[in-house]
Amino acid sequence: MTQTPSHETVRVNLGERSYDIVIGPGLIARAGAEIAARKPGIRCAVITDRNVAAAHLDSLMESLATGGIEAVPLVLEPGEKTKRFDELVKVCDHVLGARLERGDAVVALGGGVIGDLSGFAAGIVRRGMSFIQVPTSLLAQVDSSVGGKTGINSSHGKNLIGVFHQPDLVLADTDVLDTLPIREFRAGYAEVAKYGLIDRPEFFGWLEQNWRDVFAGGAARIRAIATGCQAKADVVAADEREKGARALLNLGHTFGHALEAATDYDGRRLVHGEGVAIGMVLAHEFSARMNLASPDDAARVQRHLSEVGLPTRMADIEGELPATDILMKHIGQDKKVRRGALTFILTRGIGEAFVADDVQADEVFRFLEEKRGS
Amino acid sequence: MTQTPSHETVRVNLGERSYDIVIGPGLIARAGAEIAARKPGIRCAVITDRNVAAAHLDSLMESLATGGIEAVPLVLEPGEKTKRFDELVKVCDHVLGARLERGDAVVALGGGVIGDLSGFAAGIVRRGMSFIQVPTSLLAQVDSSVGGKTGINSSHGKNLIGVFHQPDLVLADTDVLDTLPIREFRAGYAEVAKYGLIDRPEFFGWLEQNWRDVFAGGAARIRAIATGCQAKADVVAADEREKGARALLNLGHTFGHALEAATDYDGRRLVHGEGVAIGMVLAHEFSARMNLASPDDAARVQRHLSEVGLPTRMADIEGELPATDILMKHIGQDKKVRRGALTFILTRGIGEAFVADDVQADEVFRFLEEKRGS
Ligand SMILES: NC(=O)c1ccc[n+]([C@@H]2O[C@H](COP(=O)([O-])OP(=O)(O)OC[C@H]3O[C@@H](n4cnc5c(N)ncnc54)[C@H](O)[C@@H]3O)[C@@H](O)[C@H]2O)c1
Ligand SMILES: NC(=O)c1ccc[n+]([C@@H]2O[C@H](COP(=O)([O-])OP(=O)(O)OC[C@H]3O[C@@H](n4cnc5c(N)ncnc54)[C@H](O)[C@@H]3O)[C@@H](O)[C@H]2O)c1
Ligand SMILES: [Zn+2]
Ligand SMILES: [Zn+2]
């Protein structure tokens, strides 16, 4: 591509499955040219949701047409509930109905919901087609579009069904975030901060200083997104299929997923990144409780996330939460359970997260009982 | 395992995804011990169909229990129509409902339908679980249980949705074939003969001499199955994800799939292997028509398959076939189409199959028009 100084490219190194994440402004307008240059003759099915379609589908279709790329769009309902079997069938039928072949691409234009669902479809139609991500939420740009995890939810839990299917290209247009509801921007920001908390303490410090500029747009936003992508790309390259180190990316997520399940995945009450924000604070506090980390670090995390406007306490969630034993059930059902023992990502301090696979359920229960009121 | 002289083991070499196919009598009774020895502590979901359950589920459950392996069975309706999304959801729910983890196994006890469906579920639940095949049809033992192709059908065509997911172990109990309806045994035999026709002319000659013993059971059956598995394992090792050489395994399948579609996948009219038998004869005859091979080879193939009792002509199918342009549509919809040109497996003679990716649709049309009456 023609690099302009305002763009950053992060390479995800996975052997023959390696790919670029291009980050910067105006990328939707250039998508047709970018894709045509890399994959001449390709045809596409563009999967998106109603919200994103309203703001960006026309530009993308126009850009693809300009690049000489034939494309058929499918617009789904927005929201986590779209990550289900019925919708997966719809996407597969759309792709097959368009008579796309193995080398043709499914293009995901949207947030993590569209990315996870479309990526799963791309992974199973004809046992694997090309896949291109055009992530439009902050969360999708720094997290879900990178690494090849795709999937849908089941009545038994979130993301329990899916495949690993790497994209061939990710185009993260930082301008599109301007149409993202601020609440969703904040939710994505929780995942940005997560990379600092896992193993980049200086990045967390930088965010504490510069978060207002990240929210405002421009160079700081690009830098934050590129740092997030790089952090995720590093972990993914080390552990593509989540057998070890990749588990660190679940910091805050075991608690977070349980809270999402407990609120019935109702985005009005809690969106994914908000669950993660509360979950990360809980993970730090639980680590302090276990004498693994200083309570000061937990307080610092809570302070920063709440400063940007994220919920950080279970009590911040509107409405009643179910009883703690129901929360525990959601935690037990989480896919990170290994033969009985609970696995959590805990921490020794900011930037020092680690995998703890011997966490006692009753300790967690007592901790949640106490925290839910505060 | 304790090898007895009557057993053969074929190794499928796929790096860290390598696995054994064990072939011989009495393996269901030993399945619990075999699995427990390889995967201590594993739990299983056993997926099967009503026909197979009636004959063999109790023995397998007993054998697993004896090996100390906890297992929960799910019995589905028999038949190709079971390879659909609804049933996939049922299997996934069953596996998740049993709270199996990534290292636990989905066990397919059945023919290719159960193997393809369960393997797909194993490939997507928790983004990939262990998978063990206990194939009970001849077709499944020599073909569908080997190589990791899994999937379901779509309204757009057969096997259009699925994943590559290799099993960890295949236990092919040659005794169970004694309860298989003879028609199904014959259908599986078509796939056995296919390996001879692809690139093992001496094996085809051996089958012409010894097919009665293969049908009768005993050493010839084990030898035929092991040769078939070895042939398939060789191709799969060379081309795991069907980018090239593996396409040869589709000899007879483009015509065969079109005939299956044309008969609405109604097993009373045509089962998969029967479609393949007719398809292989057509592929040889079309190759002769194109002056690629001698008509004598086509005649020899037709003679042998019809001697064992397989249909070899479109006219052998009961009931009306749709018009030739509908057949052509099914051929065009087949996943082996690449950017418009038709890809067929053609041959230069017995044991000399090759991939032809420039087959003209109108030649095929004329050929089918003429052949359908004969
Ligand atoms: N695959 C992974 O590795 C991975 C990682 C993290 C999260 N996830 C998944 O991602 C999902 C959450 O992603 P999300 O937060 O992007 O949710 P989302 O896709 O639901 O998007 C959030 C909301 O913002 C809207 N939206 C998105 N982009 C917009 C834009 N530019 N302008 C206006 N509106 C826009 C959407 O319509 C939606 O209403 C969850 O399902 C989660 O499980 C996956
Ligand atoms: N994955 C692959 O690589 C691959 C390769 C070839 C074929 N296939 C698929 O395999 C399927 C055909 O397989 P199939 O012919 O085994 O069909 P099948 O599974 O429908 O079995 C045929 C019939 O025999 C019955 N049966 C099976 N074993 C029995 C036993 N021991 N005793 C009594 N009854 C028994 C079944 O209930 C069924 O009625 C097709 O869907 C085809 O697409 C897949
Ligand atoms: Zn997340
Ligand atoms: Zn076949």
Image (cartoon, coloured by chain):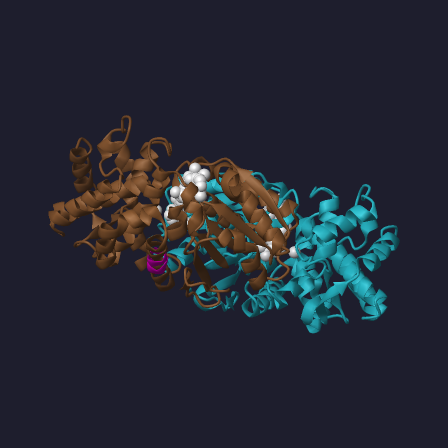
Chain colours: A cyan, B brown
- Asked if one can make out residue B332 in the rendered structure from this viewpoint, the answer is no
Can residue B277 be seen at all in this image of the molecule? Answer: yes
Image quadrant occupied by the N terminus of chain A: bottom left
Q: Main secondary structure of the magenta part?
A: helix
Judge by depth and name the residue closer to the eye, A211 or B129: B129
Q: Which residues are magenta?
A: B226-231
Q: Residue B229 colored magenta?
A: yes
Image vertical order of residue A354 relative to residue B140, above or below: below
Task: Please indicate whether residue B225 sits to the left or right of residue B20 in the image.
Answer: left
Q: How far across and down, in percent of the image, does residue A216 sit?
A: 66, 58
Q: Above or below — where is B68 with respect to B307? A: below
Nearest the eye: B202 or B89: B202
How far across and down, in percent of the image, does residue A166 sit?
49, 58
Q: Quadrant of residue A235?
A: bottom right
**Relative side of A30 to A238, left or right:** left
Residue A312 position, x and y percent, is 79, 55
> In front here: B144 or B28?
B28
Give me the residue at 81% from left, 44% from top: A321
The reply, left or right, for residue A183 in relation to residue A289 is: left
Q: Residue at x 23, y 39 (%)?
A: B312
Q: Nearer the viewer, residue A18 or A74?
A: A18
**Image spot of residue A363 (x, y percent):** 83, 59
How many badges with numbers are in the image? 0
Q: Is residue B352 left or right of residue A301?
A: left
Q: Residue furthest bottom?
A: A202
Q: Residue B6 lies in magenta, yes or no?
A: no
Residue lying at 30% horizontally and 40% vertically, measured from the top left? B275
